Amino acid sequence: MPLALFDLDNTLVDRQSVYGDAVATLCRRRTFGPEVEQWLLTELADRANLIDFARLRTAFDLEASAAELWQEYVTLTAAAVTCRPAVLKGLARLRAASWTIGIVTNGASDIQRAKLTATGLIDLVDGVAVSGDLEIRKPDRRLYELAASRCGVSLADGGWMIGDNPAGDIGGGHQAGLRTIWLASRPWPDGLTTASHVVDDVTDAINILLNETSE
Ligand SMILES: [Mg+2]
């Protein structure tokens, strides 16, 4: 069974709009001013973690604990995140075509798992590796190895990595011995091995994989 590993944020789900919604709601509920909202939008632009809320608390002398604010942010993120029906349907088609599907994602374990549950993605995949589980991040090959073993397969048998981050997803996938599909979202950086395929949307990537098995 061929292996397809997917990135989560800005590949299977749109993190960009979700984090903005979660920050806006958190600030409204807590009556935080625009300076707090702007700080969060800047600091959480690429990733969010408990430690960010500890820094926020110190920077603005807030009363609520970092753990309380982080938990609220996780809950709001889970409430806001969605996975498009076309993507869910595509993954179901891959499974029906005997693909093994894993997710390999950089992020805190609790928020990434909350997103996987809220979107229903968790029911469509065979294994998940979150960087926060081990403090090992993409492009580290060990996170790919963990994802494959949680899917019950070995990287030695090859497979595919699909993601939007040139270094983490495409560079990391390549180092892990996988073929790669890049969701083009930014200029390609100099010096990195290019992806096997470049697409605009993850559904195009899924169609490439489906064609592989039908050939
Ligand atoms: Mg991503």
Image (cartoon, rainbow, N blue to C red):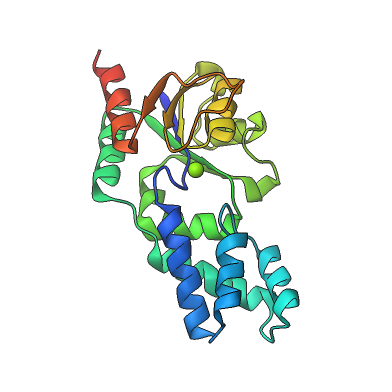
Residue 144: image location, x then y, percent: 58, 32
- In the image, what residue occupies the spot 45% across and 55% down? 16
Decide if residue 66 is on the left or right side of residue 20: right
Quarter residue 86 falls in: top left
Can the viewer see residue 1?
A: no
Can the viewer see residue 112?
A: yes
Quarter residue 196 falls in: top left
Quarter residue 35 falls in: bottom right
- In the image, what residue occupies the spot 57% across and 28% down? 189
Q: Nearer the viewer, residue 74 or 61?
A: 61
Residue 200: image location, x then y, percent: 34, 34
Residue 164: image location, x then y, percent: 47, 37
Decide if residue 213 is on the left or right side of residue 28: left
Q: Nearer the viewer, residue 208 or 21?
A: 21
- In the image, what residue occupies the spot 39% across and 65% down? 80
Is 181 rendered above or below residue 196? below
Q: Residue furthest top?
A: 215
Image quarter of the C terminus: top left
Decide if residue 152 is on the left or right side of residue 64: left
